[in-house]
Image (cartoon, rainbow, N blue to C red):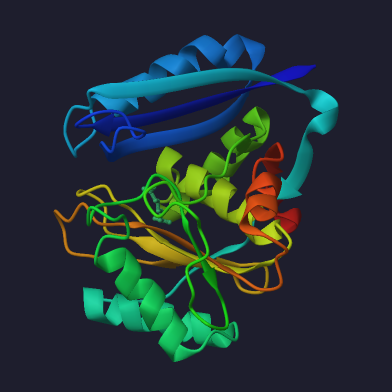
Amino acid sequence: MEWFSVRMRAAAGGSHEQGGSHISGGERLVPVDAVESMVQSLVRRAMTHELGRPDFVNVTVEVVPAEAVRSLPALPISKREAESVEQGHAVAVEILGELGISREVAELAVCSIAEGPAPNGGAMRGAIVMDADTGQRLESDSARGVRVAKIDWHPEELQAWYEDVRSIGIASERIAEALALATKVTHTPGTVAELCWSDDPGYVSGYVASAELGYVRIPILKEWGSPLGGRVFFVRGISSVEDYEEALQAPVLLRREENKR
Ligand code: PML
């Protein structure tokens, strides 16, 4: 059986290559009969995004042989409390501290996302790659960052996961996608942790993910209406960002967490 990688990126004020601002993106891995509807759904996501209408949308569809696809169990999910942006940031710094990342580096990561990590002060297309010990940003293009591709849930597993988590109110496509990406990133050699919150002005939650602590949700990490969000991948001991990004492109399908199957 073949799978198809479907990728979308949208920008306003010109294409990403021409310096346009990133509006929306999506990375999915679907069976052949779902390609057409996935293209439609990602184009709809781009054209109806709260940040405004893009004037550039790029969609790529690419075949992926089944034998290249690796299966991974989803990270376990937990939640910590926060009632304000300041508390949310403090909780993120505390969790990163539990993972061996110093307060200084963790605060630098939080500030980098909060202040708009791209050179134009907006959100990036991909993620910041940060040295977990020095806080140095390693990505070579700070507008693009590092992208993760070819990632999704196995279709039947996704439906079962929605049933598992419906009662705790997190059965959303946004969280399913974030959990899939975080699982892949934290299983990629060299990753210590990921910090993320949304750049969608209508969504303020985020998470810290790691192989050690799982996917830890934080209810508020930015003010309502803010378009500033993004991801930081904290790394240690990678040979180069190029090799690290290549590993983030390896096709992965998610299944439910081991103890939920
Ligand atoms: C995004 O919108 O791209 C990031 C999603 C973060 C999801 C956080 C959560 O609610 O678990």
- Residue at 74% in and 48% down: 72
> Taking the image as drawn, is residue 261 in sight?
no
Q: Nearer the viewer, residue 196 or 144?
A: 144
Q: Nearer the viewer, residue 29 or 261?
A: 29
- Residue at 78% in and 40% down: 70
Residue 259: x percent and y percent? 74, 58
Q: Residue furthest right?
A: 67
Along the horizontal axis of the image, is 202 left or right of 9?
left
Residue 220: x percent and y percent? 28, 67
Residue 127: x percent and y percent? 46, 54
Q: Nearer the viewer, residue 121 or 73?
A: 121
Quarter of the figure that contains the N terminus:
top right
- Residue at 70% in and 57% down: 188
Reply above or below: 70 against 143: above
Q: To which quarter of the image does residue 112 belong?
A: bottom left
- Residue at 65% in and 12% down: 32
Reply above or below: 35 against 79: above
